Amino acid sequence: MKRGRLRALAVAWCACVAVAVCGCGRGTDIFGRPDPLLPFDKRAPIGVYLSDAEPLIERFVDALAKQNGGALGYDGSAYINGCGETGDEHGIRVRSPGLKILMTDAMDLRALSEQILEPAGFTPPDTFAPDEERSLVWGEDRNGTLLSVYYVPGEMVRFYYHSGCVPFGDMSEDDLKAKVYGRDLTQTFPDLVLYQSFDTDGNPQGPPDQQSGTSAQSTQSGGGQ
């Protein structure tokens, strides 16, 4: 009963403030994330996300950045966290850092979605208005993989992506940590100019060619991903 009330409140909140991560009409959990359609034990394990789904999203990000100046802002690093709905479901979720691309043509999102994400089974946002500031979500419903984008018209997109709550499969926790934390964004996006989205005072900043003073660098390590 309590869970049903929380779910109803989450859905109502989604409708009121139009936050796209609430799933564009799909069922959601109490945090507003789309519910995977497959039962927990039928979802692809985390190794499949790391080998198949995550590289696909990274290909989308790489192409979007290259069409908009070749720079990618980042905040924080990738991380993993445990998850599960019941005590016997020891699931795991992997999430990317917060990322940012300065862009002026929103139709890049639409075109690259059709070329890369949708053929791989990602459901695009129900509506897309290129002149409106809004949140957008692409979801792979079977396993709960999610790409969440906040679009500011003519300025930028901020986004992150993560796996659904999925089983470990054959991968141990130590192997997962080594794989996720043992690489950085310079390995994931070797052809992009990487920069921190915020300066040391916490103020938003753009790519190095838009920065002044000693803080401007051609590339920076993206930290552990």
Image (cartoon, helix red, strand yellow):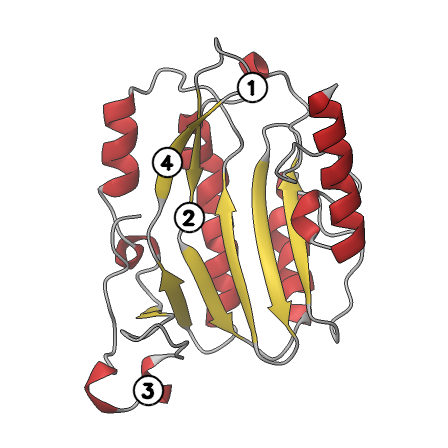
What's the residue at 75%, 28% (across, down)? 5
Q: Earlier in the sequence, mark 3 or mark 1?
A: 1
> Quick check: marks 3 and 4 in contact, CB under 8 Å?
no
Could you tell me how far apart the alpha carbons at marks 1 and 2 are, in whole angstroms? 22 Å
Could you tell me how far apart the alpha carbons at marks 1 and 4 are, in whole angstroms? 17 Å
Circle 4 — which element?
Answer: strand
Query: Which label was assigned to residue 85?
Result: 1
At label 2, the amino acid type is Ser
Front residue (pair 16, 103): 16
Could you tell me how far apart the alpha carbons at marks 2 and 4 are, in whole angstroms? 9 Å
Q: Tell me where residue 71 sits by quadrant.
A: bottom left
Circle 2 — which element?
Answer: loop
- Residue 177 lies, in percent from the top left, at 26, 33
> Quick check: marks 2 and 4 in contact, CB under 8 Å?
no
Front residue (pair 125, 215): 215
At label 1, the amino acid type is Glu
- Residue 142 lies, in percent from the top left, at 64, 28
Q: Nearer the viewer, mark 1 or mark 2?
A: 1
Circle 1 — which element?
Answer: loop
Q: Earlier in the sequence, mark 1 or mark 4?
A: 4
Query: In the rendered image, which residue does mark 3 sit on?
Result: 211
- Residue 157 lies, in percent from the top left, at 56, 68
Q: With 8 as the anchor, is 55 left or right in this view?
A: left
Front residue (pair 133, 138): 133
At label 3, the amino acid type is Gln
Query: In the rendered image, which residue does mark 4 sit on?
Result: 80
Front residue (pair 182, 152): 152
